[in-house]
Image: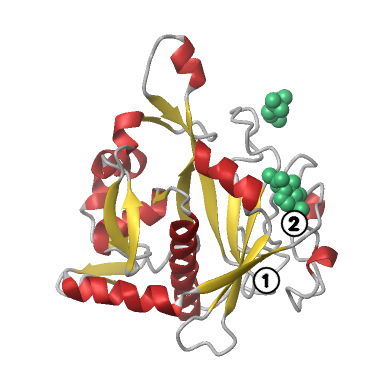
Amino acid sequence: MILYLQHFNLILLALSHVSQALPRTWKRDADIESLQGLTQITRDRSGKAGDPDDKYFHESTFHPHYDGRFAEKVLPYDSRRIHLTHLIQTYLSTMYDIGAETWLMHGSLLGWWWNRKIMPWDTDVDVQVSERSIAFLADYYNMTVHHFKVPGVNRGRNYMLEVKPHYKNGSVQDNLNVIDARWIDIETGLFIDITTLRRDRTAEELGERGHMMRKDKHRYLENQVFPLRNSVFENMPVKVPYAYTELLEEEYGPDALTNTDFEHHHFDEKEMEWVRVQE
Ligand SMILES: *[C@@H]1O[C@H](CO)[C@@H](O)[C@H](O)[C@H]1NC(C)=O
Ligand SMILES: *[C@@H]1O[C@H](CO)[C@@H](O)[C@H](O)[C@H]1NC(C)=O
């Protein structure tokens, strides 16, 4: 336990960061011209042109888990893992610093379940925030850039938090915009999808209390999520939903918690690691 704590201190120190706000406002996601100075990239590879008008965030034309304003290419396996690890560590550290409540969900929660790490075949990270936290992030931290000293990287790295304008609209009709905010690595274009867990007001009107929902129609009971539990993910303090086993079984089926062969990887129970299987 003491070992763990020392580890945290080290990482938190190493990740101590500076943030600054970008002063301008835009109607849609910040366009590439407005981001000059932040990125060396001059060609916008976001799928904006082909996306419906009402969609706020635009994924790249070459991969749905890269932001085309910051990415030129898909990263190789090993380097993607390192960048994703820094992405979640810097996100958790920032949310902790500013006091925004957040917890793991979906594939990232499954990774946590197996070995407290991102699953090596994953290309993104999923987290949730409360309604109060998203409002706080929108009001005070939209378009802020956070600089981190990352161990082994001289220049350090920059991450940007972007909150979409209509984040308050919890309508399931708004299915183009299920993602409320993103934490974006502006060097690689990899990002964390941030969604809001809302009270299910329709259910409440019908007299059912304690129902929560996410815009993509995932429904949860309040007592499946809260009280959040404290744990560790990628060597950082993290929160996870209370009834994590139930939530994971509902989303992925019970096999996802026992099957040690998945996506060309085998789970080595001695090492507690997913090992890539060479074919
Ligand atoms: C955040 O900033 C972007 C870029 O200026 C803007 O398009 C968006 O509407 C802002 N979001 C909020 C919640 O104000
Ligand atoms: C929320 O989004 C839906 C779908 O785009 C739209 O029909 C509705 O008018 C929006 N609600 C508000 C309050 O803006």
Secondary element under disc 1, as helix, strand or loop, is loop
Residue type at numbered disc 1: Ala
Residue at figure coordinates x 82%, y 53% from the top left: 49
Q: Is residue 187 above or below residue 140?
A: below
Which label's residue is closer to the chain start, 2 or 1? 2
Residue projecting furthest to the top: 206
- Tell me, yes or no, whether the two marked residues, 2 and 1, touch with CB atoms within 8 Å: no
Q: Is residue 241 left or right of residue 162?
A: left
Viewer-side label of 2, 1: 1
x and y percentages locating residue 3 in the rendered image: 19, 76
Q: Is residue 37 left or right of residue 241?
A: right
Can I make out residue 59 in this image?
yes
Residue at figure coordinates x 24%, y 51% from the top left: 257
Q: Nearer the viewer, residue 155 or 252?
A: 155
Secondary element under disc 2, as helix, strand or loop, is helix
Q: Nearer the viewer, residue 63 or 57?
A: 57
Tally the numbered discs. Answer: 2
Query: Residue under circle 1?
Result: 71
x and y percentages locating residue 258 in the rendered image: 20, 53
Query: Residue under circle 2?
Result: 47
Residue projecting furthest to the right: 33
